[in-house]
Amino acid sequence: MWIPPLLVVPLIVYNIFGFGLFGGPGWGSPVVTLPMVSGATWSLTWGDLLVLLALVTLFLEVLKSTQTNVRSILDHMLSTVVFVIYLVEFLVVPAMATSLFFTCMAMSFIDVVAGFSVSIRAAGRDVNLN
């Protein structure tokens, strides 16, 4: 079963809230605030949740890149398209010019590089020079 590039999910979530389609709280607004044993207070923000979502999808994308089949080529090309969308939005859309969006874009770039690197190494092992 083919699964599309998962890093499109944080892109869609950021676009929904970045363009204000659902209003919603700001990325710096706390979701949970917990007192710590040390006496400090730890807050988890909406932006932190988006980064966690992007990290989980990056992990799943790296796992997907270990497959070497015809679908993996399509997946790598689509991951590149997702990165290009991130890059274009970051450069031309004012609402996307944030560190949070840049971090998600960097994860998308890492996905592209890791996917091609893993595929090239796996293909190199498949080649027998004997």
Image (tube, rainbow, N blue to C red):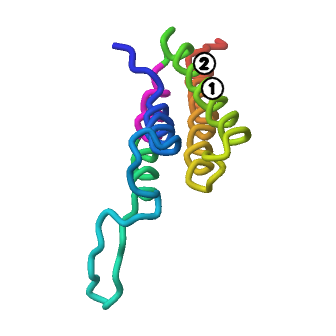
Q: Which residue is depicted at the point 52% across and 45% down?
A: 18
Task: Say which of 79 and 101 sits in front.
Answer: 101
Up-down: is 109 above or below 33? above
Answer with left or right where residue 129 lies relative to residue 64.
right
| Among the 4 quarters of the image, the one containing residue 100 | bottom right
In the displayed structure, would residue 39 be above or below residue 69?
below
**The N terminus lies in quadrant:** top left
Give the residue displayed 44% in from the left and 31% down from the top: 6
Q: Quadrant of the C terminus?
A: top right
Kind of residue at disc 2: Met
Whole-percent x and y of residue 124? 62, 21
**Of the numbered discs in the image, which one, if any, rests on residue 88?**
none
* Closer to us: 61 or 95: 95
Q: Secondary structure at mark 1?
A: helix
Residue 44 to residue 130: above or below: below
Residue 23 coordinates in the image, percent (x, y): 41, 47
For residue 125, which quarter of the picture?
top right
Q: Position of residue 34 (x, y in %)?
A: 27, 76
Near mark 2 (Cα within 10 A), the count class, few <14, some 14-19 or many ≥20, is some
Amino acid at pointer 1:
Thr
Q: Is residue 34 above or below residue 22?
A: below
User: What residue does disc 2 label?
Assistant: 77
Residue at mark 1: 80
Question: What residue span does the magenta drawing correspond to?
Answer: 57-67
Closer to us: 119 or 52: 52
- Rendering coords of residue 11 (x, y %): 50, 37
